[in-house]
Image (tube, rainbow, N blue to C red):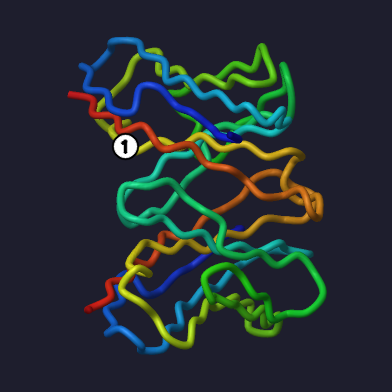
Amino acid sequence: AQSVSQHNHHVILSEAASLELGCNYSYGGTVNLFWYVQYPGQHLQLLLKYFSGDPLVKGIKGFEAEFIKSKFSFNLRKPSVQWSDTAEYFCAAQGSSASKIIFGSGTRLSIRP
Amino acid sequence: EAQVTQNPRYLITVTGKKLTVTCSQNMNHEYMSWYRQDPGLGLRQIYYSMNVEVTDKGDVPEGYKVSRKEKRNFPLILESPSPNQTSLYFCASSLYPSGTPGQETQYFGPGTRLLVL
């Protein structure tokens, strides 16, 4: 069955620390991958996406993600987090010919000032 | 300004009382979708629509209905709400069905928080 797993439910970091949020997917065939961010009280916004090509994808606000096909992973990274990165982060996956997107359960990121 | 709007933003209702949550987009998008967000479960797709008069079930369609009579509107209907439908609901739209390179970004509405007593 198609699924997206985010194993870190809540991550707490200090400002300037490096961030890596895990995302693993289970999909047959070609897959499109996304990371969305939801700031407190706001709707989801797209951080970055991977469809094909360079497996290292750069997104907005200094975020990047690496698609590792052999590991079925699409981890999100940021070298130095800021307090304003406090939010919930969702990984999502989609089969290339489907319109249904499956989201992970989300990772809440808290940054200590 | 390009946006997806939802109304109401907050709603408290009682079991069995029919309600409709509206969703409207001003970007002439073909694809629209409804999700519910629950703690620990992330977002789950309820229904989606590829175009006018074309709708299909997502992962959790039970207890919901949708319609797509016009391109800009995609209302979510709860004919007989139950407490397990208490949730945060998001509408989203995109220009083409997701999966078309370059046209896949979904725009999300601000959310509707529903409490069913």
Question: How many other residues sit within 10 Å of disc 1, few (<14), some (14-19) or many (≥20)?
Answer: some
The chain that hosts pointer 1 is B
Look at 67% across and 55% down and name the residue there. Answer: A94
Left or right of B102, for residue B8: left
Q: Is residue A89 above or below residue B72?
A: below
Left or right of A37, for residue B94: right
**How far across and down, in percent of the image, does residue A1 sit?**
60, 58
Look at 28% across and 12% down and name the residue there. Answer: B16
**How far across and down, in percent of the image, does residue B79 sit?**
40, 13
* Residue under numbered circle 1: B87
**In the rendered image, which quarter contains the C terminus of chain B?**
top left
Specify the quadrant of the image occupied by residue A30.
bottom right
Amino acid tagged 1: Ser
Secondary structure under the numbered disc 1 in the rendered image: strand
Considering depth in this image, is A85 or A97 the residue closer to the camera? A85
Look at 28% across and 76% down and name the residue there. Answer: A111
Q: Is residue A94 above or below residue A112?
A: above
Considering depth in this image, is A15 or B1 the residue closer to the camera? B1
**How far across and down, in percent of the image, does residue A102 sit?**
57, 53
Look at 54% across and 32% down and name the residue there. Answer: B4
Specify the quadrant of the image occupied by residue B29.
top right
Q: Is residue B85 above or below residue A101?
A: above
Q: Residue furthest front?
A: B1
**How far across and down, in percent of the image, does residue B70 sit?**
67, 14
Left or right of B96, for residue B40: left
In the rendered image, is residue A29 in sight? no
**In the rendered image, which quarter contains the N terminus of chain B?**
top right
Specify the quadrant of the image occupied by residue B63.
top left
Left or right of A32, for residue B5: left
Considering depth in this image, is A53 or A39 the residue closer to the camera? A39
Q: Is residue B61 above or below residue A100?
A: above
